[in-house]
Structures are given as structure tokens and as C-alpha cells.
Image (cartoon, rainbow, N blue to C red):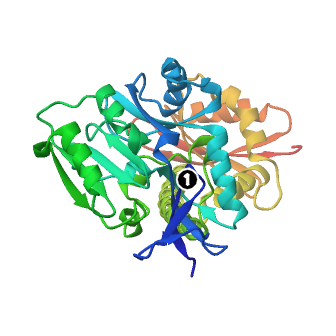
Amino acid sequence: MTNEVILRLFADERIEWCAVGGTTIRRDEWPVAGSVIRCLLLPAEWVLRLETPRVSRSLQTLRQAIPYAIEDRLVAPVEQAHVALGAEDDPASVVVRVVDRERLRSALDACTQHGLTIRAACSEAEVLPADAEALLWFEAGRVLFRPTPQAAVVVSEESALPDLLKALPVATNRRFTVCSETALSDTQSAALDALLGPARWAHVATGRSLCLPLAGATQDDRRITLGNLLQQDFAVRPASGDALQWWKRAGWVAAVAVGLLLVNGVMERQQLQAQLADTHEKMANVLREAVPGVSQVVDARTQLEAELNRLRRGASGGDDALTLLAQVSPVLAGSTRYTLQAVDYRAGTLELTLSGEDVSTLDGVRETLAALPGLQVELAGVTPGKGVVEGRLRIRGGAR
């Protein structure tokens, strides 16, 4: 199992660290190679916290614009600074952390040289007690001073504290919380009484390092996520465990996507089957209309093609029905003396059923058709009716 630690660097190159979930502070020796630094705490004097108006909701635009918006508040050229955006959800302003690029790179390289992997890095000021109105943190001859919970932290030597309080006055109604790992000395207490007044400060002996507040925190702790400096050029690859989690999430997303594709495929298949069935039904209706004698439709297209071929060739390979119709149609068209009732074609013979005023009318039609070259025409039968006479003309091709 990977060993996770919280590691703190000091400006004088000292270190201290503790294991995640542990309470023992180790100093002056690095964690074992292969350990993962859940959070690297950098000296507060290295990291400048600034607040600037939010000029855009776009993260990309903010990253491009903010370095130039804070340029006049920096001592060194902005090109030498690494600017990390905070994640506070303030619509009007954005909090940024600024650190010298070379100094940050040197700290990260030192950890890498000892075989350590870093997940996040932030200022030690991020883990100071957040509920104090005004805070003084005494530690190893240095003092971390935060006038208000939202203010930036100022670091000075303990001997320069009087000048610091004069330069950054605090409202008289604001009480100070003074923290240190051990009890204050009489000299320190007397100096605070003289500077602040006995009633304006209260001491809290923390008995612990600033590493410990994060030792029991999760990777998503807001103190880490809001102040994480490892962004853009310094962003680190996910740890193997995190990568595994991302791969699992990607797998679930892929599974859901495949499921949606399968559902969509099934729905499209059902729609296509319904459309195909509707098309077959329409083709069957066309076949029944074109060939009234059809009793069963198995394959409408094939049956319709077969019937068309039958009409063209005839059952015994005789003359083409369409050819015969083409020859006789000019004679039959446009007359009001007779009416074409039916057309039938069998065995090379085209049979026309006509109705007219009398037999002589039908016989006249026969003679006219018989006069056409290559046709044999006979009046096969006559059936008298009420005011009309119905007869059948049989027409064959070939010489007479």
C-alpha cells in the first residue's frame, strides 16, 4: 500500500512531515522513497495571496488576464511568477496565489529527487485556524500574522513584531488569538501585553505542527483544493489510484454509452421492421389491384414481375400481349359507338370484350382490326342485352 504523507518545507530548507492518519511529526529526514505527498506545505512568505475583480466567467480568460491585472502589485516581473487561481465561488472577485516559478520548481524537484510523488502543494497559511478574528502564530523565531480571517498572511521575525503591528494596525475591538506549539515565555507574554494590551489577546498552546491539521483530512479538503498551486505548467499527473478511479469512471461512461447505442439500435430496428411491413402491405395492395385473380401474396415484387412477364410472353411463348395492344389501341381509342369492357390474354390470344349498339357495329370493329397487317381477328360470340350487344373479339398475331 502506498505511504501518504503531509510534508512541510521551511525557508531555511528544514523539513517536517507526518503520515496521513498519523500524529507523529518527523523532522530533518525525508519520507521513504515511493511515498506520496498528499499535500506539500510551502512557507507562507513564499506565497502571496491577492484578491482581484473577476473580469470574466471563463477560466481560460481569467488565466490570461489576471497576471496582468496584478502586475503592479508584484515586486518581481510577472513573467517570473506562477499565478494559481483559487476556487472560491465569488461572482465578483477571484482569489489568486502567486509564487516565484523558480522557487516552486526547486521545491518540487527536491521532492522528486527523494523519490516522492506530489499530489498538491499550497501555502502553510491555508491551514492556519480559520475562526480567529486576528491571528498571531509563533514558531521557531518567526511569526505568522493574519489581521482578519480573509486577509493575507504576513511573516516576520519575532523581533520585528512591534514594527509589523504598527505597519498593519488592527481595529481596537478585534481580539487576537496567539498560537504556539508550547507555552509562551514570560518575555513573549510581556511583549504582547505591551503591544496589544492584556485584554486583547488569548493564548492557545496547539501542541502540534501545521502538518497535523491535514493529516486527518481527505484529498478533497477545501484547504487543499482552494489553495492548490499545482495548476497549468505545474499540474501533476493523477496518482495511480486516482487514475484507476478515472478509468473506472470512464468504463462506466463507456458502458452507459454502449447501452444507449444498443437501445437506440433496437428502437431503430423496430422502426425499420414496421416501415418494411408497411411497404410490403402497400406492394401487396398494388399487386391485387393490378392482378385481381391473385389469391395469396407471398412476394409481391416477384409475383408482379412474373405476371408482367406472362403478359409479355404469353403462357406458351406466343405473341407479346403489349405488342398486340399497341397495334389495336389506335383503332379502339376515341370511338363512342362501342365500349371496351374487358381485356384478357391467354396462350398468345388477346381477347377484347366490347359492347355496342348492334352486331354490325362490333363486326365493323372486327373488320377494321382484321385489316391491320399481321393480325387474325374473329368475333367469338355475341350476347344481346337491353339496348346493347356485347361481343368478344379474339386477336392473334401472325399471317392470315
Nearest the eye: 55 or 106:
106
Q: Quadrant of the C terminus?
A: top right
> Considering only vertical position in the picture, is 367 above or below 145?
above
Residue 128 left/right relative to 29: left
Residue furthest to the right in view is 399
Q: Quadrant of the N terminus?
A: bottom right
The residue pinned by badge 1 equals 283
Nearest the eye: 118 or 276:
118
Nearest the eye: 292 or 107:
107
Nearest the eye: 249 or 341:
249
Determine the residue positioned at 15% across, 42% down.
175
Residue furthest to the top in view is 72
> Considering only vertical position in the picture, is 54 above or below 123?
above
Residue 224 left/right relative to 115: left
Q: Quadrant of residue 179?
A: bottom left
Circle 1: element type: helix
Res. 132 visible in picture: no
Amino acid residing under circle 1: Met
Determine the residue positioned at 67% across, 40% down.
102
Res. 244 visible in picture: yes
Q: Position of residue 319 (x, y in %)?
A: 82, 49
Q: Position of residue 333 (x, y in %)?
A: 62, 26
> Considering only vertical position in the picture, is 76 above or below 101?
above
Q: Quadrant of residue 172?
A: top left
Residue 387 left/right relative to 107: left
Q: Position of residue 373 (x, y in %)?
A: 85, 33
Q: Position of residue 374 (x, y in %)?
A: 86, 38
Q: Residues within 10 Å of mark 1 (few under 14, many from 20)?
A: some
Residue furthest to the bottom in view is 1
